[in-house]
Structure formats: C-alpha cells, structure tokens
Image: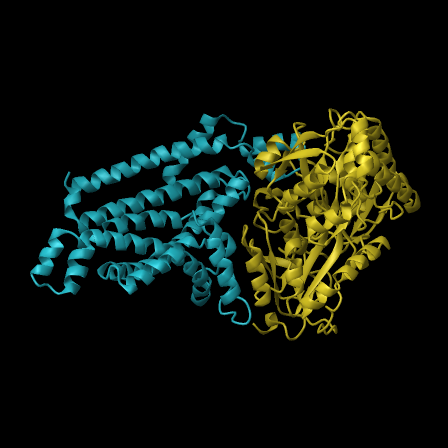
Chain colours: A cyan, B yellow
Amino acid sequence: MNAAFVARRVVYGLISLAILSAIIFACTHLLPGDAAVTILGEGASSEALAALRARLGLDRSFLAQFLDWLVGLPFGAFGTSTTLNQPAGPIIAERFRNSLALAVTTLGVAAALAIPLGVAAAARRGSRLDGSILAASYVGISIPDFVVAPILIIVLASPPLSLLPSGGFVPFTESFGGWLAHMVLPVIVLTFLLTAHLLRQTRSGMLEVLSCDYIRTARLKGLPERIVLWRHGLRNGLTTTIAVLALDIGYLMGSIVIVEEIFAYPGLGRLMVYSVANRDMPLVQGSALVIGAVYVVANLFADLAQGVLNPRLTRS
Amino acid sequence: MASESFRSRRMTRRRFTRDLAASGAGALLLPGLFRGNAHGEAKPGGRLTVALYKDLRTLNPIMGIFGNEWRSTVNLYNNLTRLTANGGVEGDLAESYSAGQASAAWTFVLRDGVRFHDGSLLSAADVVATIEKILDPKTAAPYKAELGPIAAVRAVDRRTVRIDLASPYADLPKALASSMARIVSERGVADFGKLDGTVYGTGPFTLKEFVPNERVVMERNPRYFRAGRPFLDRLVLRVLPDTTSQIAALENREVDVIGEVESDAFKRVAGIKGVKAVQVTGGTFNNIVLYVDRPPFDNPRVRKALRLAMDRSQMTDAITGGVGTPADDQPISPAYEYFDKAIPLRKADLAQARQLLKEAGHASGFEHRLVVSNSPASREKTAVVVQAMAEQIGIRFNIELMDNARYGSTIWNKGVSSYVGNYGTRPTEDAILSKLYSATYGIDEGRWAPTEFGKKAEQLIVQGRQLSDRGERRKIYGELQRLARDEGPFIIPNFFNSLYATQSYVNDWPTRAITTEMRAENCWLSPEAPGRKA
C-alpha cells in the first residue's frame, strides 16, 4: 500500500469533517424552539426567558455563536451543555466510550457468527444448509429491534428465569461482572440485526468471487476446497463485507436509539435524543460531530483494510 | 391470582374510588394488597432503589422543572415548611411561624442546631440568600411567581426570618413548601453554577453520585436533625425510560419502588406478585385551550356545546386506563382541600349540544386546529378522545402532533392555535387557580382577561388569597370552581391519579397526591428485603 493512497484518504476525511461541522451548526439553528424554553418549561414568563437567553448567550448572532464553537473544537471543547450546565466534552466522551464498548462487542460477535456462516452458505449454495441459513437471516432482518428487545426482557430478564438485568448500566471500572451482565441483552438484540445483514453480504460477496475464473483455476489445480475458500475466496469476497462493517459501526455509534432507550443504556444515541428534544445545542452539535467522525474514521479504516486485502485498489 | 382478583373487582373499585374521592378522602389502596406486609417496628439500614422514567437533568432545586428533579432534591434538602400527608402544612426547618396583621408579614423561627451536609450551621442568612436568589430576575427561576407576592425578606436575628408581602397572602407557608423553595446554604447560593451537580442542603440524605439522566445515589445523612431518620443507608434513583424494562426490574427485585407508574402500566404492575400498587387521587390534568377572544369559541354557546358533548366518565377511562378521576373543566380535583363536592359532574347531552351549535350558526359544525406536543404522551390521548367526543356534534378537531420544544416556542400561549396544555398538582388551590385564571398572577392562556368571566375570576382569586378563615376561603374557591366549570376557557376531561408501586417489603413509602413529594426519610425495609442482604 502506498503512502499517497493513505494521505489522500486522510485528507478526504478531514475535508468531510469540516463540511460536516458547518452543516451541523447550521441545521441545529434551523430547529424551532430554543434551550431557554425547554429549561424553564411551560409557564415561564417572557422576562425569565429573556434573562436566561442572555445568560446562555442564545441572543447573540449566528456567526458569533458558530465562531465561538469552531475555536473550541480543536481543543476538544464542545462548549457548555445548556440544560445540564456542565462542559459538553466530558459528557459526550463518557457516552462515546459506552457506545464504543457496545459497538465493538456487537461487531465482534456479529462478525464471528456472520462470516463463517456466510462462507458456509455460499460454499454449499442451494443446499439445505444454505436454505436454512438464508431463512434464519430473513427472520433476523425482518423483526425490528423494538420487538426483539422486549421479548428478550420478558424471557430472559423476568421471572421465572431472571438471568440478566433488564436494563441499566454499570461502569466497567466498578464491576466487570456487572458491566458484562448489562451488556448481554443489548448485544444480543443488536447482533440479531447485524448478523443477518453481514451474513447476506458475505454470502453474496463470496458467491460472486466463487464464480470467478481464478477460483476455477485453483480448483482445477487440485487445491483442497478449504484453501480455495478461506485463502483465495474469502480475501476477495470480504471487501464488500468490510465496507458494510464500517457503515455498521457508524450505525451502532448513535443510531441505535431504540435499543439504548429500552435498556436504559447511556450511549450517544440516547444523549442525542435527549439533547435534540431539549434543544441542548452544544450536546447536539458535539455528538453529531463525534458520530460523523466515527463514520469518517471507520470508512478510512475500511478503505485501508480493503487496500491490504486487495492491493489493486490502492493504485489509481 | 392477584391480577384475577383485580379484574373482577374493577367496577367495584372504580365506584369505590369515586365514593372515596367524593367523601374527600385522598388516599386509597387497591384491595387485597396489604397481604404479606408485616407492619412492625421500623428497622434502620438497607439500600432502596427507585425506578423513574423521564429526564433528570439537574439537582439545582431553584432551576428544576421536572418531577424527577424534585423527587431527588426533596431527599437532599429541606424547605422552611413541608406538606403533610393530608395536604396540610407544618414547619420543616422552621420550628414555628406566624403571620402578622392580615397575613401581610410573616415571621419564621428556625430550628436550632441544624447543620448542612458540609457541617456548617443553618442560619437566617441562608434562608434570606435562597429566597433572594429565587426572586432575582437574573436567576430566571421558572416557578418564581408561585412563591407569592414577596416584597422583602430579611434576617431579624440568627434564627428569625421576616418576610414582608406586597399584598396579604394566606398560603405563604404552603408556597414555601414547594419544590423550588428548598433552602440552599449561603455558600451554595454563591456557587450557583455548581448547584446542578453539588448539594448544599440539610436533607436526610447526602449526595454520593449524580449522573444526569441516569442515576442519583444518596447516602444516609448521619447529622440529620430528625433523630433516628432516615432509616435507609442508601437511596438510589435510577432512570429507566422504558416501561417493559421498568416492570421487569420490579419483577426481578432490581428496583424496590416505581416512583411514578404510567397509567397504561398500572394494571400490569398491580398484577405482579409481592408488589403493592397504590393509587391516590391526584390533581394533574391536561386542558384543551379554547381562545375566547375570537371565533368560534368566543361564543359561549359554542363552548357550552363542546362541554356538553363530553362523556367524562368514559373519557377518563379511555385516557387513563381506568385509573383517573373525571373532571368538569375546572382544575381543582378532589385531592385539594377546598374541592367543592357539591358541584355535580356534568352529564353529556348531545341533543342540547347540537341545538346550541345550531343557535350559534354552526348547524353543520366546523373544523378546528388542535396542536399536541409529544410529551407527556397523555396529551395525545386526551386530544384523540376529545376529538372523538366533539365529532358527535360536528366539531371536527384537526390534530397536529408536534415536537415539545417547537410546541413550547411557537404554540404554547402564543395565541395562534388551540392546544393541549399540561399541569401538575400544586400545593395550593391558589397556585393553580391564579396561574390559569388571574391576569395579574397568571398567564391568561385563553385570552379571557377582558371578559366578564376574567374580571370575576380575578376578583375571587385576589379575595381568596387574602383570607385566612377556612370557611370563607371554601366559599370563594367553590364559587371559582363553578365559574370555571361553566364559563371558563378550558376543556378538562379528567384528573390523573398518582400511581405508585412498591415491593411488599417496603414500608411507609410516601404515596402522596403530589407525586414529587417523594420524601423517603420515614421509609424502612422489612427483614426479607434484598437491599438488607447486600
């Protein structure tokens, strides 16, 4: 892989982030309603609203607020949360860590399940095994998370089984067992969705590759099927799967609002919903930017990984 | 089995609710739920976890607007006064208090030797600092107006505070018991910016950990001024926004109490073995705001027609799932002391309603926009049920669902459209009546101030807040309830009951009409409680 390829990708990533930050800031200012209204609630007098707007700096011009925000960004300062009255950076950082733990665990489990199953299904295309794997993945794709999650709570986290806590979160540093126990149900629900998705991706990628001439050559050369599949086939078959994985990590970092809400998991998605509903702009902007950055970085890694798997992609 | 008996007694229970409510008794317990609750001597110790839904943003008592914030601060701070279980008032940090002539000046004498969590002694200066901070317009305290017409507050000596009023106000002691008026130390007032996450109080529990919108962990305050209280070693409030996981957590005994049960979930919760489900007649309501300064609701006939189209018992069942109290377009519920039980519940009369509409020139009915905020969810239900009732006489409400922040800044009290408002139970009749019907102390939501109704209501409110004689006040507030019922600018179909669920081993949990009065200092755990073993 050459350095120019890497550099080009990094520069693209930075440009995307810069554009993203401007769009986020502009969009949040288009939202009707402001933090003063949500902080003081219904029944607030107009004098109280004006006093609070002045204190929060909401009465300043759009440009002044944007510049203020932009200047803080390189130092990791996302401003002060208007409704929680705390620096937004540490709040977002904590949620980011929680979401990352959930995303990485889920992706690990999903990949470990989906890739072998996808390869197996592709290798025995049309067989009974292929049929049942496909059917199972259809089920996985079509049942929404807001159905799976309550069912799991009722089955696994309610009497008589009561195997797991129904929701909530224990920090890793407080108790590893507690942390793990609270992770299990959300991870199962998310794995349920992602595995189906990844599996189908792997299967179709592999099928395409397995119909290539070089695979036929490999087979004709008398290579064992194991080597043909896992060494020659998978390497090329995984390129799309990796791109999908990169998108999935972005999805897991902030779009899994329903799962986080049901399990009371303190991730970026719940923070996002809270901050939009309460017009807490520094939190909205900060978490949107962080989620955007995750997409950019994940795609960067996906590009690089694809480059390693398939060096032809790095030559342009 | 518990759910079985619950269902079969449903009708009986509802009648029971109404009878009890009508007789003025507030609290009522579901039948058959005392079983297994071995009431005995209170034993100190143990840990108790309360599940809450909705947001919990700040521990700053002066700036809080959410129930969960008040449920936290009531355990971390004290007020000068506090509400008693039956809606009366007594001294809290104040040992005694008295009114000067015509309730225009009040003197509060503080308990001696009360210490803040940081060890400093409570003095009159702390009380003055707190009240002045609330009154300062720069603070923008959301509930400032409900504190009453305070003109000045000063420390007479170390233990005596004098509050001068701009006009007589008999409810001052009750107003000072409200959630915003927790007494913060002088140092805490100076560190106002830190109050969101730091506690400068005297309350029964000290703050151990606070994660906004996640949890509040509190520990027993060994210096608490009420000897032997609190009983619990640890009190944890956990935000669990999803009903299914809340109920599962209760079934698993991960949580010991649900601090505020959603009405949809109440029957399911009541069916869980080993759980006490309690409902108390509350005063929370949703109101449909009709503007009386413009067509079509400027015409009293049209308003009356709409009122007559509403079958209130049916609506109450539909909106609250059978755990509410029918209301009659006025905001005083049976939970209030001066609720007038002599006023009969209005019956629906569709024929008369149609006739009135015809006389008003709307023989074929009309369309009307009704905006609904998405939070709390009960607003939408109220709108849909009102829509169905109104449709019977040809009034077609077009419901428009809206994000809460947008609703708050573009619709609420902006005079642009009818909408569904939402009010919680207040400590006094005056607090809610003056908010809704006084142009001076309230917000003139229905644009009625210049009307005959507005003038009459204003006069009664001013009269009511100055009276200290209870019989006379009862008369005034009764008159106000009739006036609001027949001529007011709102449709109020029902009150929401205050709903609680606790494990049977939880004793003396505060079940009040005002759900935010969640003061856990008297609560204790029976020996079989899991929180005693850990």
The picture places residue A315, in percent across and down from the top left corner, at 14, 41
B166 with respect to A255 (left or right): right
- Residue A39, above or below A199: above
Residue B385 visible in the snapshot: yes
Which one is in front, B334 or B236?
Answer: B334
Q: Which of B528 and B263 is in front in this view?
A: B263
B144 to A95, vertically: above or below: above
Residue B133 image-quadrant placement: top right
- Residue B419 at x, y = what percent? 67, 35
- Rendered residue at 81%/50% (across/down): B334
Q: Where is residue B424 in the image (x, y as percent from the top left)?
A: 71, 45
Horizontal side of A120 relative to B44 (left or right) equals left
Residue at (31, 51) in percent of width and height: A245
Where, by quadrant of the figure, is residue A43 drawn? top right
* Image quarter (top left, top right, bottom left or bottom right) of the N terminus of chain B: bottom right
Q: How many marks?
A: 0
Point out the residue furthest to the left here: A221
Against B502, is B341 above or below?
Answer: above
Q: Can residue B149 be seen in this view?
A: no
Locate residue B240 relative to residue B484 in the image: left or right: left
Looking at the image, which is closer to me, B361 or B264?
B361
**Quadrant of the rendering where the C terminus of chain B is positioned:** bottom right
User: Residue B379 at x, y = what percent?
Assistant: 65, 43
